[in-house]
Amino acid sequence: MAKVTAKSAAKPQVKAATKIAVKPKPKAVAKPVAKVVAPAVKPKAVKAKAEAVLTISSKNYGAWALRGWLLAKFSGLDFTENIVPPDDPDMKAEMLLLSPSMLVPSLMHDGIKVWDTLAIGEYLNEVKPKAGLLPTDAKARAHCRAICGEMHSGFTSLRSALPMNIKGKFPKYKVWSRAQADIDRIAEIWALCFKTYGGPYLFGEKPCAADAMYAPVVTRFLTYDVTLDKTSAAYCKAIMALPAMAEWVAAARLEPEEIDELDAEF
């Protein structure tokens, strides 16, 4: 039996594995999350409703419609238009509901209904006193009311012989004597106003109710090629140069070429 020595009996020594120090990974530090601030949303602008509604008819043929519309424009009133087509067979029935006199324009403002052009002018002068629809001087104001009233109730021969027709052009139109008498009277009224108040408008430097009342006459004079003195001709140019008149004429040119005679407003 082989002799086992202590040397041989010793177990082979296994070298211990060298430990490698592993540095611990630093813990990830969470970055602060920036607060996302939603952009301020501006409220949508809400368009304010117009203060008033003005019912009118044809802009090409509507003399009274033009007067009321200019009064509203000159006053600075915020309004929308309700246009009743002159060729609509229900026009008269609708106007009967809107205006007991069956006349246009008709103004609705703050629940108040006003028809008849002179009444509209007086009403607007009350609600918009700073607009100067009527002169501040008592004497001039009385004069203004007088010539507005004369236009409102008179000049029937002119109206029937030379109906308003902005798009129409009738060179060298023959004016019969009664209509000419109305033309002469209007020129006389204008001349007195220019002499008294200095122009370029009937009562001074700013258009007023009187200019609104006589504006349709200006369009008639141009349509029918009426012969005028220099002062009256200059006044016609001043009226037609008003931005409000330019706006009205542009709209009138977009209307149908013809309407029934009975539907035209004289």
Image (tube, grey):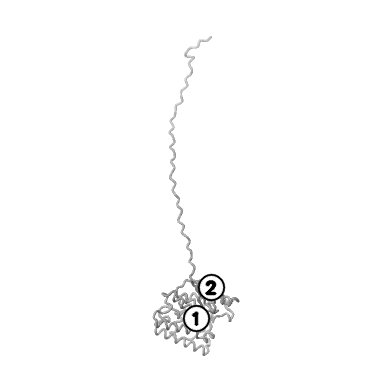
Q: Is residue 1 above or below residue 90?
A: above
Q: Give, as a three-letter code, the residue at label 2.
A: Asn
Q: Which mark is residue 216?
A: 1
Give me the residue at 47% from left, 87% from top.
Answer: 185
Number of other residues with Cα within 10 Å of mark 1, as a class: few under 14, some 14 to 19, many 20 or more: many
Give the camera-side residue of 226 and 4. Answer: 226
Q: Give, as a three-letter code, the residue at label 1.
A: Pro
Secondary element under disc 2, as helix, strand or loop, is strand
The residue tagged 2 is 82
Spatial separation of the CA atoms under disc 2 and disc 1: 20 Å
Secondary element under disc 1, as helix, strand or loop, is helix
Q: Quadrant of the C terminus?
A: bottom right
**Image location of residue 158, percent across then percent down:** 51, 86
Give the camera-side residue of 75 and 195. Answer: 75
Number of other residues with Cα within 10 Å of mark 2, as a class: few under 14, some 14 to 19, many 20 or more: some
Give me the residue at 42% from left, 75% from top.
Answer: 129
Give the camera-side residue of 31 and 5. Answer: 31
